Amino acid sequence: MKFINPKIDLAFKKIFSSGENKDILIDFLNAILYEGNQVIADLEINDLIEADRVCGVKDTYLDVKAKTNDGRIAIVEIQVINVPSFGKRVLYNTAKTYAMQLTKEERYEKLKQVIALKIADFEMFENQTEGISRFVFKEQQKQFDYPDTEIELVFVELPKFTKELAELENAAERWIYFIKNTSLLEEIPQKLSKFPEIYKAYQIAIADNFTHQELTEMHNQELWIQDQKSAIEMAREQATQTAQASLILRQIMKRLGTIEPEIENRIRVLSLAQLESLGDEVLDFQTQSDLTAWFQTNLT
């Protein structure tokens, strides 16, 4: 048995945003937002949000918008590529959704809470070990809530969830495991099949349920995403390599004085591994002949 990748646009929409599957979305939101408690009893799935696209990153994120039985609005977004200004776009789209609840004739009292659930396939908060983070308006020093906490941001960082199937402890972890690992499985995990909504989601995610055209489209999306991630990683590596080369050149010039342009150019094209090796020995250099000897030893 083969499964599609729930992080891909078409697959996510089919699992979570169709009217006949709203029980899946209800269970998912209750799990992530309310620790599995049945806070949301019913909801209405709205049309996909026409969120502002960032030039050059088409199809790298998606949205599902739902209104709960008590009027709250939930936005679910998966972001698979760490694009610039993602945080600002989160704030913009959430605030825009909150403001668009009212017409010009309506009063502010009709405004309902907007909860933005953002699932990131990358780490957003490097110094935080927890995989789920929640943000609301609070007083800066004493940390008490703003009286009308109408906007809430919830982030799920997939890379921080590393638990194996046997280690899953709660509904949130089960759903995150589903989103992160389904495409790697060959059968529905027995441990998860006893949960009706997750079992239903797995049934929908079976590749045989999709047409050849849909599977081709999802495959092309995955290839495109992988290409974008590779390009971003390469750019970051090049930036790191350039910074490292500049640092080592400053150290060499401080110890040995001016060096020949040819030597400087040779240093600037070294790989990161070679720069690290050179950096380990720079402090032992006494003359430029030591630098020449390093090149002869390491690059021949």
Image (spheres, grey):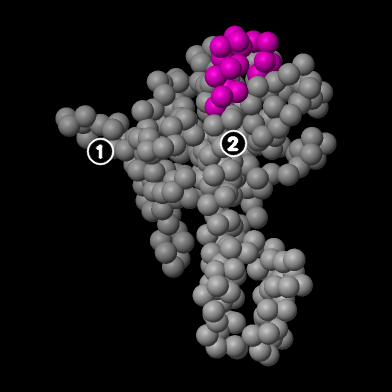
The residue to which callout 2 is attached is: 226
Residue 118, percent from left and from top? 51, 39
Instruction: Indicate the quadrant where residue 49 lies.
Output: top left
Mark 2–mark 1 Cα distance, whole angstroms, equals 44 Å
Is 222 included in the stretch rendered in magenta? no
Q: Quadrant of the N terminus?
A: top right
Residue 210, percent from left and from top? 61, 11
Is 217 included in the stretch rendered in magenta? yes
Q: Nearer the viewer, residue 7 or 215?
A: 215
The residue to which callout 1 is attached is: 108
Q: Is residue 105 visible?
A: yes
Other residues around mark 2 within 10 Å, as few (<14) / some (14–19) / many (≥20): some
Which is more N-terminal, label 1 or label 2? 1
258 w.r.t. 274: above or below: below
Query: Which residues lie in the magenta part?
Result: 205-221
Residue at 64% over, 26% down: 5
Residue at 59% over, 68% down: 266
Label 2 sits on what residue type?
A: Gln
Instruction: Indicate the quadrant where residue 259 lies.
Output: bottom right
